[in-house]
Image (spheres, rainbow, N blue to C red):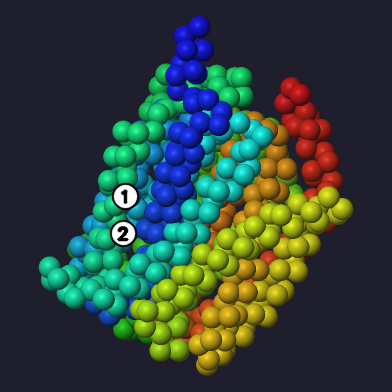
Amino acid sequence: MATSAAVLKDVPREGGLYRWYVLGVLMLIYAMNFIDRQIVTILAPYLKADLDLTDAQIGLLYGTAFAMFYALFGIPLAKLADGWSRVKTLSIGLAFWSSMTALSGLSSNFVQLGAARLGVGIGEASGSPAAVSLLADYFPKRIRASVFALYTTGMYLGLGLSLMIGGYVVATWPGSFGLAGWQAAFIIVGLPGILLGAIVYLTIREPVRGALDGLPQPGSPHPFRDVFVEAATMFPPWSVGSLKKLGASPALVRANLGALAFVTLMIALLTLGSEAILPPDRRPVVFSIGDFDVTSSLIQWLAIGIGAYAATSWIQAIRLRDPIAFALTVGAPAYRTMAAAGGILGIYTYAIGAFVFLYGSQFLAMGPEAGFTLGAISAIAGASGTAIGGTLGDIIKRRYPAGRMYLLFAALLGFTALTFVQFNTGDRQTFFVTYFFALLLLTVWPPIMLATAQDLVIPRLRGVGFAVQTLASSLVGLGLGPYMVGLISDATGDLRLAILSLFALMPILLLLVWRCARVLPESERTVVERARAAGEAL
């Protein structure tokens, strides 16, 4: 009876306005999430000028510094949202990442700005897991798809507003308080999130998990211990001990240590290779430890290496802890192929997003006022592309089991042609028009990949299916895409060439999408059969 009373108290009656208030607040938080992560795009030329940054450092700030910690902390913080108060998780995370955004405006060098961006990534990792879980307990199943679609519009609102607000502040800031325009922009977009965090804590009630589905469940009795246990599977030396506790064989432990050795070697080789192709004035020393100079290249590849090892250890732990989850995700060819394609798709999405305004300022004499146009394009084209990808993908799939992948394949061909026009034109209007339609075609991929990932797993593994897919797009797409464009730009002195060089990956991406389309129907048809074969009781 206590549970029933809690349900009645903490979950509003269906049709009540309060749940829609909650949705509105969570949409606003999602918008602020993307404002804070995306604003580097419009500020890039001014960061370069005032802080003497290279293009590779811009890519590192936009991508790697944020992505590694967003992706890696997302796993244990999702565990926290599952076991502790989601309202507290969200409000604390929001206040933290907003504070880090505001502190970015007080940075005077690359190290300070990089540390602040790292903090933004950690804080934002708490956002979506808590918000999505709350929405599932405020709205019944029959309208959840529509609710999640409304929630997702916050992302495109944030993408657009980041460019609009950032451009407006840079263009109009009079230099008050001794702050440059870019500093004021960080502070102005960051401070409201602290207030919103307090509003979340004070006005959003924590509903009972699963109550609307008739399966009320308590949180974990030891939520913070669960978080540390989850994190321990990812980072040495605790990762090895965690594997042993899970019953890992000596061969698997050796494989884990071998992965650590391989990652260490690759960090050294990639750092040396990056330094070798850069001219001397494009190899900034970030700081020194005695006689050892720490460069941007070392920071980039060290972060990527940590992410790669952590992801490997986490997947090994899943294989031991939940062999069914492993069998249906990383162990399944269709899912593996789809995740690899998602990683490359992330490279295009994030790399072009990071440098589109910097390119416009260099080649088309765009000023900060162009932020309004670019922001409107990002918001409208992004929302439209996602809606088309989800709706049209579902329609085609009803007739062709691999229809979503066929739609993605066709969209990528159109995206490639339009992007070549966009980055070869000398006319600003042509640039804007081709960018709109190229972005519309590119953004069909998130709903296609999300829906496909869910179709390839059983219901209880939807969270794991989403997490593995997110790791791929974050570690590969956000971690590599922006930095590699910046690195090539610094090495060649040609940002246009750097952006267009991304299309060397397009044949590989198209092959992966086509391969996924070939194996997908059989994989979807046999999900339950393969789960049973791996030991699931269904």
Q: Position of residue 499 (x, y in %)?
A: 53, 79
Give how far across and how far down residue 337 sits, in percent. Answer: 70, 55
Please name the amino acid that badge 1 sits on: Gly
Expressed as whole percent of the image width and height from the top left, the position of residue 40 reads 37, 67
Mark 1 vs 2: CB contact within 8 A: yes
Q: Nearer the viewer, residue 456 or 364?
A: 364
Determine whether the residue tagged by mark 1 lies in a helix, strand or loop. Answer: helix
Callout 1: 10 Å neighbours few (<14), some, many (20+)? many
Q: Is residue 232 above or below residue 373?
A: above
Quarter holding residue 176: bottom left
Q: Residue at x 58, y 24 (%)?
A: 212
Q: Secondary structure at mark 2?
A: helix
Q: Which residue is mark 2?
A: 189
Q: Quadrant of residue 445?
A: bottom right
* Residue 283 can be seen, yes or no: no
Q: Is residue 443 left or right of residue 56?
A: right
Left or right, residue 44 beside residue 76: left
Q: Residues within 10 Å of mark 2 (few under 14, many from 20)?
A: many
Which quarter of the rendering shows the C terminus? top right
Can I make out residue 446 in this image?
Answer: yes
Residue 193, numbered label: 1
